Every structure is written in structure tokens, then in C-alpha cells.
Image (spheres, grey):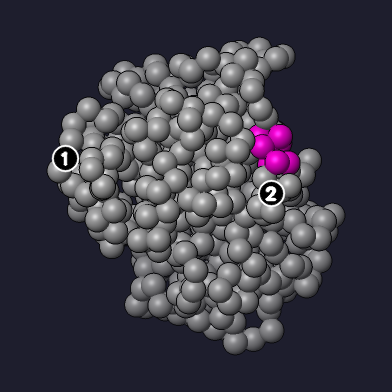
Amino acid sequence: MVLTKRIIPCLDVKDGVVVKGICFKDLRSVGDPPSLAVEYQDQGADEIVFLDVKASVAGAKTLLAAVTKTAENLFIPLTVGGGIRSFEDVRRTLKAGADKTSVNTAAVENPSLITQCAEAFGNQCIVVAIDAKRTDGSWEVYTHSGTRPTGRDAIDWAVEVCERGAGEILLTSMDADGTKLGYDIELTRRVVRAVSVPVIASGGCGTIDHIVEVLKKGEADAALAASIFHYGQHTVAEVKEILKRNGIRVREAVG
Amino acid sequence: MDYGVGNLHSISKGIERVGAEVEVVSSPSELLDAECIVFPGVGAFGAAMDTLRPVLPRLRKRIMGGIPVLGVCLGMQILFERSEESAGEGVGVLKGDVKRLKDGRIPQMGWNDVTPMDRTLFAGISEGTQFYFANSYVCHPSETVQAAWTEYGERFPSAVRKGAIFGVQFHPEKSGPQGLRLLQNFVKIAEGSE
């Protein structure tokens, strides 16, 4: 049996508050990461990702407090990323209640960090996030929230991080991100076929069809999405219903 | 039991949620006084065993004496004799080896079907329920302890049971309401055996 395809809502968090617009009804604390995470869990989300988009020192503390509070009531996996720079940051984040940590810039600057963390915590805890941008025929890795080109080829980097012990890749297409025009199918498929670890596709989701496409044509193991859920456009349950109709195996959300 | 690395928050919260009291111990000698032991599923085989080594003979005796034990993921694997992941012995209260998965994307990361054979841990959990897995290794028991199976490139035991010793390869604390149900079943079994 193959694993079910995972649907992962992503919450962009800044100073402990979710920054993208939220339109849930009957939610007391709008923008509060722990309440939103539980709301998505109840809708049938397979995992939750918190991304610290500002990643300041003070913000990181607030985020960890939010992680701990979230973990009290969250019984699905929680990945936390953004501003994780060191072994100590990873340790602290896992200890606060995250199941996985996502590293991006720090992994590029110090690739041995991946191995060090994988050996200490197990590779299933270490997600490497790759921000990739198209440059004639290939994709270049960017760091520092997509502001700095690195000269590295995204496919080569994906292969390298797996060799170094990454347990999963969170792949964001910078070209697609924010457009709501669909995931970068070609990039996703290229990375999926190049590596042996699971790949989460991210960036560009505007409709349920985009999710169907990236899971089928892009061959991704999981799809991450933000605005489609945050703006109340669709619930996770609705997405899963459509995926099922398209012949994609998903986890049944059972109460 | 805290091996010093990783997230213990989730399993503790999961067990507290179903009504039991959890004490996280980081000194292995404290395990010897426990009424029931949970080995969580974080870290690596070798590192976990290094933590337990000072009390290993006494711990084995205590477990074989019938104290309820639940091993989750890595915590299940260390109950066996050996693992391909790290050199050195396991707790060894279950006979067999731990080997790397052969096929598919590794680690196995996500939700997979679990087919129960022994209903004790799975009471009230419907057939075809999926649980959350995050593992690169699986157990190969050399005695009849399999309590559920799962398929991922190969068929492997996703749950084992020998008396009051239970192990699950998936993470019940991360498997939604049905996972909590399983933890609750374990707590009931543990209470019943006191």
C-alpha cells in the first residue's frame, strides 16, 4: 500500500500571530496560531506547518511559546521553520513541541548542520526547505527568504541534502509563490524523481485543481497551501473530497 | 523516558489527554520504580541505548516481570535485540532484529493503513484506519509477537505485543483521534494490570 497524499496548511507567523488573512467563522482568536492549527486538524489536515516569516530574536521566543501551546491540543505532526540557524535552534524547537524543523538558509551556509541534526534527532525530524527560481532551463536556490541567489542548482542541492541526512524536502517555487496560478509542476517532478525522500510541493496554490495537478503530474508526496485555506475558500475536507474523486488516496478524517 | 533529544511533549500530552499521569524521567534508574513505561519515538537507536545502558539488566528484569510497556516507533525498535541503525545491543525483551526498509521513499513519512491482528490495543478503532509513520527502519521479530501489519515496499509488523509489552511502529500521538484512542486503550490495559 502506498502512503496517502498529505494536505498541509501552512501558517505564516510573525511575532506569534498568523499574518495572512483569515476568514474562519466562529473562531474566537482570529490569527492565533494554536487555534488555527486545531481548526485545520479538525478539518482533516494531515500536518501543519508554522513558518516564521520575520524570524527576529524576540519573534522566535513568541513562536516557541505558540508551538508549545499548539502542541497541547494538536495530535497530528507539526513542522516549524523560519529563522532556524543552529543545532541549538533545532533542539529548542523540537523540545518546544515541534515534530520536525525546517531549515533553509542555515543548511546552505553550513550543510554539515543537516547531518549533525539528523544524527542527533533522527532524519525524520529534519526537513530541508528549498526556495528555487527558474533561470533558463534550470532552477537556482535562493536563501534569506528568497532574496539571495546562491548559484546552486536546485536539483543538485536536493540530492545533496538527502545524502547529508535530510528526511524530507519542502520545495517552494519562487516563481509560482503568491501567484495562485498553480504549483511549478516541472520543478516538483524533477526534484521528486531525483531524490528518495518525500517531497512537499509549495508555492502557487490557488484552486483545488492545482493540488490535484501537483500530486498527480508533479508526483509530489504532499501539497502545502496557505491562502486557499486561510481565506475560507475551501476547507481541508473539501479538498480531500475532490482529491478522492480524482482517484488520489487521502486519509479519511475520522472523528 | 527522555533520551535527551527530541520532542517528548507530544507523547506526554497525548497520554495526559486520555487521563493518565506522565512523569518524564531523564535518569534511567528512575524507570525502575515506574508503574508503566513509555519509550518515545525520537532520536536514534544507539543514542537511546546509551542512555539506558547503565540500568539495562535491571530494566530487563523489571519489564520481564510484567510491568506494562509501550514503545513508540524507535521506542518499539529498542525493545528488540539489535538494529542495523547502530551497533550495540537493544533492550532485547523481544526477540528479533531491526532492519532498514527496502523499498519506496525512505523515511516512510505519512499516513499508512494498519491491519490489526490482536484487537487489544485497537479496541474500538475501525478497520482501515490510517496512522502516521515516520521511520526508516522496521522490526523483524523472530518470535510470534505481531499484533498488526502494514505494507510499505514489504509487509512489516506495525504493532507487536508480548504479554504487557506493546510496541507500535507508527506515532499514535500524531495520528489524530484514532491514535488517542489507542493510547487510551493502552492506559486502560496498564491500569487493569496494577
Compared with residue A45, is residue B135 higher up or lower down, i.e. above or below? below
Q: Position of residue A159 (x, y in %)?
A: 29, 59
Q: Position of residue A117 (x, y in %)?
A: 30, 52
Disc 2 and disc 1: Cα gap in Å?
A: 38 Å
- What type is the residue that disc 2 sits on? Asn
Compared with residue A74, is residue A251 higher up or lower down, i.e. above or below? below
Question: Mark 2 and mark 1, same subunit?
Answer: yes
Residue B132 appears anywhere in the view: no
**B75 left or right of A250 in image:** left
> Which range is magenta?
A236-242
Residue at the spot of label 1: A150
What label sits on residue A246 in the rendered view? 2
| In the foreground, B186 or B190 | B186
Q: Is residue A112 shown in magenta?
A: no
**A37 left or right of A26 in image:** left
**B44 left or right of B132 in image:** left
